[in-house]
Amino acid sequence: MSMFGPGAHIGSPLPQGQLVGNYRSYEAATAAVDRAVEAGVDPRFLSIVGRDLRSVYRLRHRPSYAAVAGRGALQGAFFGLFIGLLMSMMTAGQDMLLTLGSTMLLGAIIWVIFGVIGEVMRRRQMKYAMIPSMTAVSFDLVVDNAVAGQVTAALGPQPGAQQPSNTPAAPSPEPEASEPSSTPSEPTGGIQDLPDGRPQYGVRVDPKPDAPQQDSDESDTSR
């Protein structure tokens, strides 16, 4: 598949819009486009963008010398036929068959010689034939924002589709109420108690009540 077909503009900007789907093959992308067009979408709003272009070199066996000679003879014969017709027109049609036969034979011989020599030189450089091509890893279907909803409704969920930006965000779950801790509260100051409530150092002593005031008699005696 040629990546640059008729009417292609080298260096043109990438299409802007919404990514409707990403496909692993060009045929799958064109099938999605066909369904969208059948649903009434204007194809001018649709674009197929190849992602991650790669150069691929496919290897083949070199053709045999017999195949090279046969192809060269056929090409030379057609070229000789064309030259023979021109010569016959210039000589007013005299000995037309002889002229055509000689030019076709001469052309076939010359093409066979040059074809075989060229094949020998190519085989010295490389023992196999290499066919270069360019392909993409995946293909994006990009549509204009004006018809994005129509294309999405016609195609349904597609692989690699881009979510629209105006989709409301899902509400965040409310935080669950924390369970009360079973451990006793720790004092804010001083030395903390052990988990079972006992003091960490020493023995807790209950505070004593204040001493009662002495009788008035003792106060009088002191006087």
Image: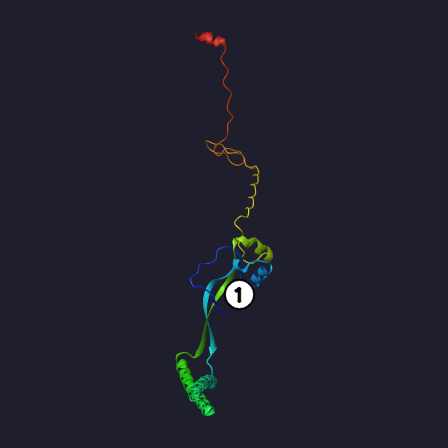
Q: Is residue 173 above or below residue 10?
A: above
Whether residue 65 can be seen here: no
Q: Nearer the viewer, residue 100 or 167?
A: 100
User: Which residue has dot 1 on it?
Assistant: 26
Q: Position of residue 40 (x, y in %)?
A: 59, 58
Which corner quadrant holds the C terminus? top left
State which quadrant residue 103 falls in.
Answer: bottom left
Residue at the image point whose x is 45% and y is 92% from the top: 95
Q: Position of residue 104 (x, y in %)?
A: 45, 88
Q: In the image, 151: left or right of 75?
A: right
Residue at the image point whose x is 55% and y is 54% from the top: 147
Q: Is residue 67 above or below residue 130?
A: below
Q: Position of residue 74 (x, y in %)?
A: 47, 85
Q: In the image, 154: left or right of 73?
A: right
Whether residue 216 can be seen here: yes
Mark 1 nearby-residue class (10 Å; few <14, some 14–19, many ≥20): some
Q: Nearer the viewer, residue 26 or 148?
A: 148
Q: Amino acid at mark 1?
A: Tyr
Q: Position of residue 13 (x, y in %)?
A: 44, 59
The way the protein has been coloured in the rendering is rainbow
Circle 1 — which element? helix
